[in-house]
């Protein structure tokens, strides 16, 4: 049997990824010039498939970065002159605030207790803030920010830009792009692709902000200056020689997801999420880390164990099944399990049976 990865990222490859990579190698995708027509067709297909799959409005731009980390830096450089506001629900969302501080911006940060999501009325954004950053799915703690909260923030602060970390949420957790200005993700989580590629989606408000900053003499970056990225993406080009194999595989996997249907994918996620919840609730030594059911992630389950978590992790590893340990300081007390589109019902049922039978 193969190794099965339920780790929250990198995770199992989407089940068609290997076949697409093999085809790409045969077709010379890795050796083709990124200035040639073959690459332009690949990038166009990638943009179009993602727009359809994720319901991205036509006038949003789909850009290529190296990963989500890069998007954090690009968004601050291009969209914030002085002040940013960050809702931090765990280690990943905190990094965004840290990068803004490193880039010399004045940072306002609402840090909530791990495993919780702030109520809408706790989010008070000072007047001079230009950008609000939110995390759709905090992979460190297993929390999901409800769409109503995101939409309500937009209504309360229509003049501020809103950035969403979609990394372990999209394309599973739906998002209304009209309520946000920019969203980014890395491909090694819910999309199930090899790491080393990020997608950064921006609207024209972000672009206008970048140009306004530049007109004031602010530095908005070099080879990945937002106006250049948008201009190049419009003709299916990138400044650098990009991860062509990654873009190709993403285009093809997005097409496969479209063919399966996003609703069918979400139904499967719901079923697998329900059986994972059941086993956590039934097990005498396991507990949900996120107390409020409404804020519990469907795609990353964070579980508190009464025993040292590596006992279960190692037990499963001996059966060639990999699950994640806790993030950072929670390494020994938490278990993290991914529920991504590539994880089949049968695989998840097998995992659930093994967890159910385990006692330390
Ligand atoms: C993994 C992750 C990131 C970082 O992604 P990189 O590919 O390492 O840049 C950011 N945010 C969230 C929510 C993540 O899960």
Image (cartoon, helix red, strand yellow):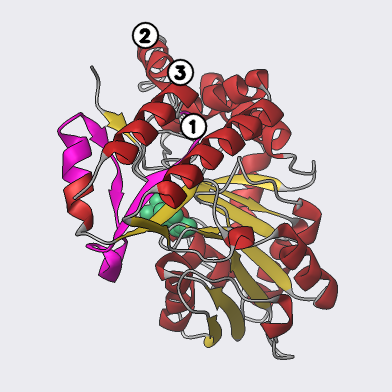
Height in image: 165 above or below 82?
A: above
**Residue 198's spot in the image, x, y percent?**
48, 46
Q: Tag 2's secondary structure?
A: helix
Which is nearer the eye, 290 or 118?
290
Q: Which residue is mark 3?
A: 16
Determine whether, in the image, residue 303 is placed left or right of residue 149: left
Q: Quadrant of residue 331?
A: bottom left
Q: Which mark is residue 71?
A: none
Residue hosting label 2: 26
Q: Quadrant of ligand 1?
A: bottom left
Q: Position of residue 181 (x, y in %)?
A: 72, 60
Magenta-colored stretch includes residue 324:
yes
Q: Which residues are magenta?
A: 313-342
Q: Residue at x 60, y 25 (%)?
A: 257
Quadrant placement of the N terminus: top left
Q: Residue at x 40, y 58 (%)?
A: 287
**Residue assigned mark 1:** 247
Is 142 above or below relative to 81? above
Above or below: residue 89 compared with residue 67? below
Residue 66 in sight here = no
Q: Residues within 10 Å of mark 2 (few under 14, many from 20)?
A: few
Q: CA distance from mark 3 to mark 2?
A: 16 Å
Tell whether circle 2 marks a residue whose Cβ is less than 8 angstroms from ligand 1: no
- The front one of 231 and 10 is 10
Report how far apart the C-alphas of labels 1 and 3 lie in the structure.
Answer: 15 Å
How far apart in space, not on screen, are marks 1 and 2 (Cα)? 16 Å
- Callout 1: SS: helix
Confirm whether residue 346 shows in the render: yes
Please check the rendered image and state whether residue 321 is part of the magenta-colored stretch, yes or no. Answer: yes
Mark nearer the N terminus (1 vs 3): 3
């Amino acid at each position: 049997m193969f190794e099965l990865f339920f780790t929250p990222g990198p995770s199992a490859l989407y089940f068609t990824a290997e076949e697409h990579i093999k085809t790409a190698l045969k077709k010379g995708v890795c050796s083709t010039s990124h200035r040639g027509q073959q690459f332009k067709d690949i990038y166009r297909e990638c943009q179009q498939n993602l727009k359809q799959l994720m319901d991205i409005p036509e006038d949003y731009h789909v850009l290529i970065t190296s990963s989500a980390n890069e998007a954090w830096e690009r968004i601050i450089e291009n969209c914030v002159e002085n002040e940013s506001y960050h809702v931090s629900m765990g280690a990943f969302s905190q990094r965004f605030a840290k990068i803004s501080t490193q880039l010399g911006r004045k940072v306002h940060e609402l840090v909530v207790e791990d495993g919780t999501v702030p109520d809408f009325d706790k989010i008070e954004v000072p007047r001079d803030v230009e950008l609000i950053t939110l995390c759709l799915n905090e992979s460190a703690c297993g929390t999901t920010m409800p769409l109503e909260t995101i939409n309500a923030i937009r209504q309360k602060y229509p003049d501020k830009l809103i950035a969403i970390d979609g990394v372990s949420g999209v394309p599973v957790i739906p998002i209304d792009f009209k309520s946000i200005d920019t969203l980014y993700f890395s491909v090694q989580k819910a999309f199930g692709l090899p790491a080393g590629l990020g997608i950064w989606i921006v609207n024209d408000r972000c672009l206008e902000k970048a140009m306004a900053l530049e007109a004031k003499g602010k530095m908005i970056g070099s080879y990945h200056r937002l106006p250049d990225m948008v201009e190049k993406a419009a003709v299916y080009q990138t400044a650098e020689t990009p991860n062509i194999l990654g873009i190709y595989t993403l285009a093809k996997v997005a097409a496969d997801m479209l063919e399966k249907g996003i609703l069918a994918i979400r139904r499967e996620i719901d079923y697998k999420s329900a059986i994972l919840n059941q086993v956590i609730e039934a097990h005498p030594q396991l507990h949900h880390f996120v107390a409020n059911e409404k804020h519990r992630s469907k795609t990353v389950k964070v579980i508190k164990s009464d025993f040292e978590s590596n006992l279960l992790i190692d037990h499963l590893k001996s059966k060639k099944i990999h699950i994640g340990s806790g993030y950072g300081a929670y390494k020994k007390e938490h278990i993290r399990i991914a529920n991504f589109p590539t994880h089949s019902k049968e695989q998840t049922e097998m995992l659930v049976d093994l967890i159910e039978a385990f006692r330390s």
